[in-house]
Image: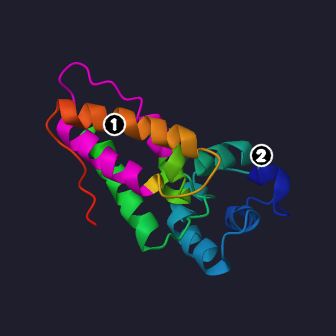
């Protein structure tokens, strides 16, 4: 929490506190400093003693997330998963940090369990994006490789049932 980790905990110098917490997990100084001006209007709403409330709002707003820079392949996978998320008809806001931190396998494995109901979303677009993302993820070595391969097979079966298939180009 901001109030318990920063030297300005009881001075209401929220900017200094927020900067300290942004830097702690390894966020670069320029990125950290760039986020503070956007937060100033929020800080004006709080008084000394409300540090935990400030920390809660900053955490909910994902201010302290260190964005992962991905290579071109990783960006393609992230974009495909975002396309799938949109075609799904929505997703929990708590997943936004996963997109920002590049937890692509985690997103894929969760989305592969999707069941469409109530006419929401676009199943063909969803499964098409998932198959392509899964094919790219399946080429990586990692502890989740077997699960990715199994879920990719499920995605392919779903895509086939909707008349879509792989969009991965050779």
In the image, 125: left or right of 90?
Answer: left
Indicate the position of residue 78 as horizontal and vertical percent values: 41, 58
- Residue that extends furthest to the bottom in the rendered view of this protein: 30
Q: Which badge, 1 or 2, comes first in the chain's sequence?
A: 2
Range shown magenta: 107-136
Circle on res. 83? none
Residue nearer the viewer, 86 or 22? 86
Distance from the alpha carbon under mark 1 to that under mark 2: 51 Å
Quarter location, residue 117: top left
Disc 2 crowd rating (10 Å Cα; few below 14, some 14-19, many 20+) is few
Residue nearer the viewer, 10 or 34? 34
Dot 2: what SS?
Answer: loop
Residue nearer the viewer, 16 or 97? 97
In the image, 99: left or right of 4?
Answer: left
Residue 123 visible from this viewpoint: no
**Residue at left offset 30%, top offset 38%:** 156
Disc 1 crowd rating (10 Å Cα; few below 14, some 14-19, many 20+) is many
Residue 160 visible from this viewpoint: yes
- Residue that extends furthest to the left in the rendered view of this protein: 163
**Residue at left offset 33%, top offset 55%:** 80
Indicate the position of residue 39 as horizontal and vertical percent values: 55, 62
Q: Which residue is identified by label 2?
A: 49
Quarter location, residue 169: bottom left
Q: Which residue is identified by label 1?
A: 155
Examine the structure image and report whether residue 134 is included in the region drawn in magenta. yes
């Amino acid at each position: 929490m901001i109030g318990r980790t920063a030297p300005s905990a009881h001075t209401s110098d929220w900017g200094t506190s927020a900067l300290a917490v942004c830097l702690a997990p390894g966020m670069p100084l320029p990125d950290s400093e760039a986020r503070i001006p956007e937060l100033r209007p929020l800080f004006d709403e709080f008084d000394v003693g409300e540090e935990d409330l400030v920390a809660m709002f900053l955490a909910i707003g994902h201010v302290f997330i260190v964005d992962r820079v991905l290579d071109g392949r990783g960006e393609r996978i992230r974009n495909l998963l975002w396309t799938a998320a949109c075609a799904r008809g929505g997703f929990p806001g708590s997943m936004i940090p996963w997109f920002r931190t590049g937890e692509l396998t985690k997103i894929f494995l969760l989305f592969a369990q999707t069941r469409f109901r109530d006419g929401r979303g676009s199943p063909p677009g969803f499964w098409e994006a998932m198959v392509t993302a899964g094919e790219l993820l399946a080429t990586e070595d990692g502890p989740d490789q077997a699960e990715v391969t199994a879920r990719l097979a499920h995605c392919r079966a779903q895509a086939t049932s909707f008349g879509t298939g792989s969009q991965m180009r050779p």
